[in-house]
Amino acid sequence: TCCASTETDVSHRKDSTPDHGVSEKIVGVLGGGQLGRMLCQAASEMAIKVNILDPLKNCPASSICHHHMVGSYDDSTTVEEFAKRCGILTVEIEHVDADTLEKLEKQGVDCQPKASTIRIIQDKFLQKVHFSRHGIPLPKFIQIDDEESAIRAGHQFGYPLMVKSRRLAYDGRGNAVAKSEKELTSAINALGGYGHGLYAEQWAPFVKELAVIVARARDDSILCYPVVETVHRQVMENICHIVKAPANESWKVMKLATDVASRAVASLEGAGVFAVELFLTEDGEILLNEVAPRPHNSGHHTIEACYTSQYEQHLRAVIGLPLGDPSMKAPAAMMYNILGEDEGEAGFVLANQIIRRALCTPGASIHWYDKPGRFFKQCNGSAECLNIISQLLKHIILASADMRKQRKMGHITVVGPSMGIVETRVKSFLKENADESP
Ligand code: ATP
Ligand code: MG
Ligand code: MG
């Protein structure tokens, strides 16, 4: 756990006798949220050591990683220090210090995927430029840096217009929709103004959102997981809420989605799993939304539903082990995100009721991320609670999103013999909350 151990990198040992069945390399992960936590869980099955760098002392991965360095993955000195303790560097979040990764790579540090990939992905505008240069179909987009260019974007693309932050976006926090020219200013203000780096995207008239997890080995060979459908709770909130695997689409659509996803990943450098978010339009066209260079929310179900989970696959890929079988071992799976509400206890009580019922649902597996911010929701005003909160405050400021609404607190995956049965099972644990039904 958070002990100040001084393990050294054993990956360059001269002695050729292996003393580990799988790999001695210590995998260093920038970020220790739920994705980092699930990477650690997969690693523990093969006794692979995972070090975590995350600013939150009690981040979700901290209790189960080999070593947790408390510090910022966006700080040069900290990342360099962390790299010294690891055999390979990888990420569970793309908002890390890409300059430092690039510098470390030049010094011979093994970063997977490559720093160039992180640099492209972490700036959504650069990402769009990159993929359009590689002939990947995507919604039209244009940089906006003042009122004039924003209005021009509206004229070109029409309304509703999607305005996005170039950087630091996740769970739709970084997107604002302007339904008309009148709403442009408020959309831009909601994203902190032009100074933060914005661009506009044409509204994608999608009938469904699809996602493909693509694994890429160190020899650049590629394997794709079955295409899934992602359902977002509200278009305005843009938070991934439900994943259905496999997606219920024609062979042709599945093939096209897989082709676009693997072409997108082939244009990037380095090993690991990548999540490719796609829009399916009414006329069967596939447009790329964005790529994540890491395990992703749309691949949680692979833990129970596939022969090799996306987490194990990521470790295999970055270490240089053979990739595992991504195919599904159950006919159908559905993943439900447990979202935390900001106000009061209500959200927590609800989550608890859902979990209680899911514990009695066949084929259901519960994942609780143990996010430290829950203290806020459990605070009963006692001196003890207030003390914990004041201690947490400085960490919470670092991860200010913790304070906001609709945080991902956990997820439940249900597997079963058909999508119909799986859906019935999910509805059964959501039943007292008609609003939440898929
Ligand atoms: P993530 O948590 O996946 O990283 P994000 O904050 O990066 O999310 P996006 O993926 O850009 O945000 O957008 C979130 C959601 O908003 C999409 O999944 C989709 O539902 C909607 N959306 C994004 N871009 C468009 C668009 N151009 N047209 C219509 N809807 C869009
Ligand atoms: Mg994103
Ligand atoms: Mg997205």
Image (tube, rainbow, N blue to C red):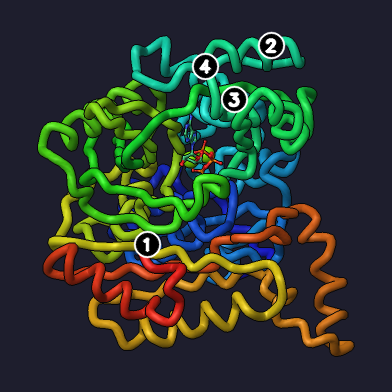
N-terminal of the two: label 3 or label 4?
3
Structural distance between the alpha carbons of marks 3 and 1: 27 Å
Structural distance between the alpha carbons of marks 2 and 4: 12 Å
Q: Residues within 10 Å of mark 1 (few under 14, many from 20)?
A: many
Q: Which residue does the numbered mark 3 point to in the structure image?
A: 102
Q: Position of residue 366 (x, y in %)?
A: 39, 75
**Camera-side residue of 323 and 119:** 119
SS class, disc 3? helix
**Camera-side residue of 140 and 227:** 140
- In the image, 144: left or right of 130? right
Q: Which residue does the numbered mark 2 point to in the structure image?
A: 149
Q: Which residue does the numbered mark 1 point to in the structure image?
A: 42
Q: Amino acid at mark 4?
A: Phe
Of badges 2 and 4, the one in the foreground is: 4
Q: Amino acid at mark 1?
A: Ala
Structural distance between the alpha carbons of marks 3 and 4: 36 Å
Q: Residue at x 17, y 66 (%)?
A: 420
Q: Is residue 219 visible?
A: no
Q: Amino acid at mark 2?
A: Ser
Of badges 3 and 2, the one in the foreground is: 2
Structural distance between the alpha carbons of marks 1 and 2: 47 Å
